[in-house]
Image (cartoon, rainbow, N blue to C red):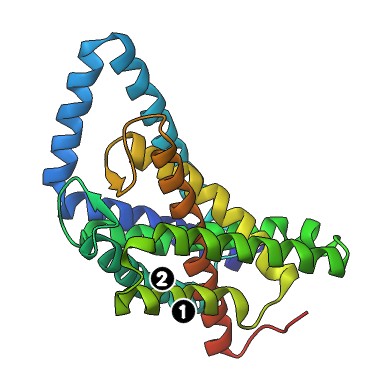
Amino acid sequence: MPVGVKARRWVAFGAAAALMLAVTLWRQDLFLEAARVTWKQFQAGGSARNKLLVEVALFAGIMLYTLRVIPDRADFKRDGLRVALALAAGWAAEAWGTRLGLWSYYTRETPPLWIVPAWGLGTLVVERTGARWSGAAARIPAGRRRLLYGAAAALILGVVAAFSWPTLAEPATVAMLAAVAAALLVGVDTARDLPVLAAGFLCVLFADTWGTTNNCWRYWLQHGYGSLGLAGGVLFGATYDTALVLGCLKATEGLLGVGQRS
């Protein structure tokens, strides 16, 4: 591996780790409270301990995977713009959902600023993962690829609209649905976009499963563990977040004048 590439990888790794540490130090009150509750649940034993161990393993896996893949293909200019756009989109998304009551965080903030950095890191994780799968996507015949992408886009729009149904009369919801549609339908490159959708759905599925079962956030239609409401909320999170991440990645390429349709 050339020295320059190796140096970029280490800088990217350090930046991601530093951002995680900065958020932890900034909201150490939440970190210490989480540690106290975790220890209490661990001492309780039984099913509470088993559930806790699964949640800890899932969270650790998410963090380790994030630190593992972000150094890949590090490009400071492109990554910096991706993160900036993702932070802005993430704040807007969280403000929309929490202020209209579509979901809420245990801290009752609308939105909680400590969650916004996760959008920046998550966008890089999805981009890196999608890039790893792009070769497989390119081998799918173009016609079949367009069909798969069209089905995925229709599913995402349908799920987001259905979940947002109680607030469809709100201008903010109309604007958010328009943003999701634009992210999916403008500048489509199925060889690039399809693996991003697949990677985003899978990555957010793990993150949302951890967040909802850990009671870090709760969707408006959620009614306890194992309910259809919880599953519906996680499905919304996985599709909605993925669409916005795709939009941020497309916008980055557009602003930098890079990328071609196919």
Q: Secondary structure at mark 2?
A: helix
The answer to whether mark 2 and mark 1 are in CB contact below 8 A is: no
Residue shown at 64%/86% (left/top)? 258
**Left or right for 226, reference 257:** left
Total marks in image: 2
Q: Secondary structure at mark 1?
A: helix
Amino acid type, label 2: Ala
Q: Which one is in front, 10 or 124?
A: 124
Q: Which mark is residue 128?
A: none
Residue at image mark 2: 86
Q: Which one is in front, 79 or 220?
A: 220
Residue 211 % position (x, y): 35, 42
Residue 55 placement: quadrant: top left
Q: Is residue 116 above or below residue 20?
A: below
**Left or right for 37, reference 129:** left
Q: Give the distance between the C-alpha atoms of the residues marked 2 and 1, in whole angstroms.
A: 17 Å
Residue 130 placement: quadrant: bottom right
Amino acid type, label 1: Ala
Locate the N terminus and report the quarter of the image it occupies: bottom right
Residue 229 % position (x, y): 39, 41
Residue 164 % position (x, y): 38, 62
Which badge, 2 or 1, comes first in the chain's sequence?
Answer: 2
Q: Is residue 51 visible?
A: yes
Q: Which mark is residue 178?
A: 1
Q: Is residue 150 above or below residue 201?
A: below
Q: Is residue 204 above or below residue 193?
A: above
Q: Residue furthest left?
A: 29
